[in-house]
Image (spheres, rainbow, N blue to C red):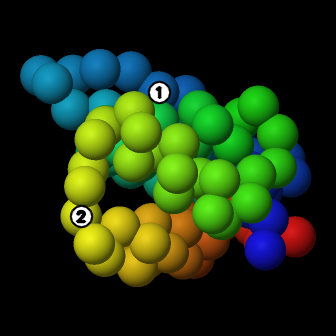
């Protein structure tokens, strides 16, 4: 399954006191993202990506080494989907 940024979503991100804050223009919502989640969004900004590729790239970049990284990435993607930021293809 591939994931992509939701069509028409515009996120304005900035760093404040070490936190990544994103303003979602369409909804008016503000989100606080962990650096791994921000990297995931940067990855999807380049185009759709398969779930396994997302997990692999995040694991390689951050050396997460967790056995349940796949489940954690799935949970983050589902939360972002509920916020209207990403979608499945």
Distance of mark 2 from mark 1, alpha carbons?
A: 27 Å
In front of the other: 76 or 85: 76
66 to the left or right of 13: left
Q: Hey, which residue is sitting farthest left in the picture?
A: 17
State which quadrant residue 75 falls in. Answer: bottom left
Question: Upstream in the sequence, badge 2 or badge 1?
Answer: 1
Residue 88's disc number = none
Q: Is residue 21 visible?
A: no
Residue drawn at x 74%, y 60% as measured from the top left: 50
Q: Residue at x 87, y 70 (%)?
A: 89
Q: Position of residue 18 (x, y in %)?
A: 15, 24
Q: Residue at x 62, y 71 (%)?
A: 81
Q: Position of residue 20 (x, y in %)?
A: 31, 32
Q: Secondary structure at mark 1?
A: strand
The x and y percentages for residue 30 are 41, 47
In front of the other: 40 or 82:
40
Label 1, on which residue?
13
Q: Which residue is mark 2?
A: 66
Q: How many marks?
A: 2
User: Could you tell me which quadrant the N terminus lies in?
Assistant: bottom right
- How busy is the neighbourhood of tag 2: few (under 14 within 10 Å), some, or many (20 plus)? few
As helix, strand or loop, the secondary structure at mark 2 comes to loop
């Amino acid at each position: 399954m591939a994931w992509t940024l939701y069509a028409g979503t515009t996120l304005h991100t900035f760093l404040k006191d070490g936190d990544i804050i994103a303003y979602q223009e369409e909804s008016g919502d503000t989100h606080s993202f962990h650096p791994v989640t921000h990297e995931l969004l940067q990855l999807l900004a380049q185009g759709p990506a398969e779930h396994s590729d997302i997990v692999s790239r995040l694991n390689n970049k951050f050396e997460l080494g967790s056995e349940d990284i796949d489940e954690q990435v799935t949970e983050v993607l589902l939360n972002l989907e509920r916020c209207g930021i990403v979608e499945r293809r």
